[in-house]
Each structure stands twice: as structure tokens, then as C-alpha cells.
Amino acid sequence: MRLFGKKKEVSLQADRPVPRHIAIVMDGNGRWATKRGLPRTAGHAAGSEVFRNIATYCRDIGVEYLTVYAFSTENWKRSEEEVSAIMGLLKKYLFEALEKMEKDRIKLEFFGDLSRLSPELQELAEKTKQISKKYEGFQANICLNYGGRDEIVRAARAFAAQCTAGAAKPEELDEEAFGKMLYSGSVPDPDLIIRPSGEQRISNFLLWQSAYAEYYFTDVLWPDYTPEELEKAISAFNQRNRRFGGV
Ligand code: FPP
């Protein structure tokens, strides 16, 4: 396997374990662009290329799931220009993903309420999801119009509706059953959550699923994020002592 450019040929997979599920808040795009005298949208464009690169890298080193925060339920507060630039980048990414699917073999999933997106984007998301269903191995989950609280409220509402319809009883609900009602229902909880850009907060990301996740923060802005940075996070993760509430 060829990693880190042309000179270093190493099989990192054999060198160390990798987290099964990595989640990333792709933060710092705006600051990255402003620092260069560019419009914020240029930062998002650079960030979407980095997503492509990091997703491929995760696939190659044996990570099973990568979940990224692309657009939150709160991001609609941004200017119309910025929102439409992010939507445009997602459209571009999905178009390209469709073209390269057979080669990339990345399974795509979406977490969030997609009904607020344009019909074209919804259709593209559905198409990529359906086509990539047959791939086994690596899965990328893109959080779109996603909020952790919103996700929990929707699941609670869905369960309440089942109870009202007589299809379920309140006492039947446990953590496992509730977890299955979330967008991430079929995906194991994240092991490692990375937030670049120097911010140290969760910002409504995977609130339920992060109960026992390890966090890793770095000052690097997302458009500058590289596989080497990811390796630093994996290495820190591998030194943590995860006890899951035990001793
Ligand atoms: C946060 O940085 C980033 C976003 C809200 C948008 C992320 C979107 C992309 C990377 C593009 C499309 C995604 C995919 C998966 C193709 P920020 O704007 O809050 O940065 P700042 O904190 O420096 O202002």
C-alpha cells in the first residue's frame, strides 16, 4: 500500500490498530479562506477536496465507517450565498461519486433530514445511496441538515407514534432499540471523534452516539488536514485506555 506520497511505502494497517468508526467535524473552512483573502466559499471548496482525500485514506487503512458533519440544522443561519455554495459542492461531490463509484467502492449514507434540501440534491443522495448499497467494507456517512438533538427528538416522536398506534409499548424501549431508531441505526457508535480548527465543543454532533467516544482536537484547519494529521489522531487514540465505565 502506498501512503504519504511517493517515498514512504508502508503497510500501516499491519503497524497499528485503527478505530472502526471515525467521525469528524470538518471545521475551519471559513477561517482558512479568510486568512488567504479568499471568500469563505473557497474554504468549503478546499474542505470538500480534503473530505475526498481523507475518506479514501480511511478506506485504504481499514477504517470501516467515517462520519462527517457537512451541514448542521443550524447552518441555515448562514448567508444564502454560503448555503448555496455548500449545497453546490455537495451536488458536485455526489455527481463525481456517481461517476467513480465502481472504482472507489465507497458506500454512502446520509444522516439528517434531507427533505429540506433541493429535490435534485435529494435525488442524487438517494441514487448514490442505492447504488453503493452493494459495496461491502468502507462506509462514509455524510451528515446533512443534521442535528443531534433533532435526531433524538425525531426518534422519540417516531416511537411515541408507534405506541399511539398500538404497535409498541413504552416499557419495551431500551437503549439498543432507541439507538436503532436514529439516523445511524445500523452503524456502530463512533470510536474517535476529531474536531480540527482549535474549537473544543460538540456543536450538536452525534450526541447519543458519542457516549463513549474518544475526542481528539487539533488546531489544524480542515482544508489543511492531511492523512498525516489523521495518523496523529489515531496514534493518540491507540494510547487511550477506554474503560466504558468499568475499571
Ligand atoms: C465548517 O467550517 C464547515 C461547514 C459548515 C461546511 C462543510 C462543508 C464542506 C466541507 C463541503 C461539502 C462537503 C462534502 C462532504 C463534499 P466553518 O465554515 O464553520 O469554518 P469557520 O469556523 O472557520 O468559519
Image: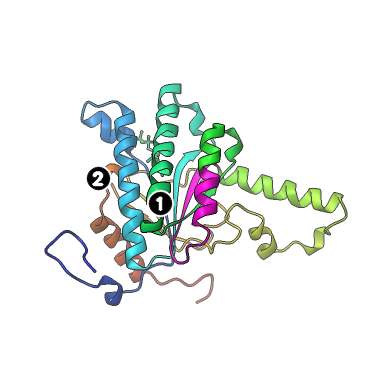
Q: Is residue 117 visible?
A: no
Task: Identify the disc placed on residue 83.
Answer: none
Image quarter of residue 236: bottom left
Q: Nearer the viewer, residue 216 or 68?
A: 68
User: Local crowd at mark 2 within 10 Å, few (<14), some, or many (≥20)?
Assistant: some
Residue 169 location (% of width, % of height)? 84, 59
Q: Is residue 43 above or below residue 168?
A: above
Q: Amino acid at mark 1?
A: Ile
Is 226 situated left or right of 202 in this image? left
In the image, ligand 1 is in what quadrant? Answer: top left
Span shown in magenta:
125-146
Q: Nearer the viewer, residue 53 or 198?
A: 53
Residue 135 location (% of width, % of height)? 47, 62
Is 203 situated left or right of 226 in this image? right
Q: Amino acid at mark 2?
A: Asp
Q: Nearer the viewer, residue 227 or 156?
A: 227
User: Which residue is drawn at the image coordinates 86% and 51% (left, top)?
Assistant: 165
What is the CA distance from the residue labelled 1 to the residue labelled 2? Answer: 14 Å
User: Which residue is drawn at the image coordinates 39% and 38% (left, top)?
Assistant: 92
SS for callout 2: helix
Task: Identify the disc placed on residue 24.
Answer: 1
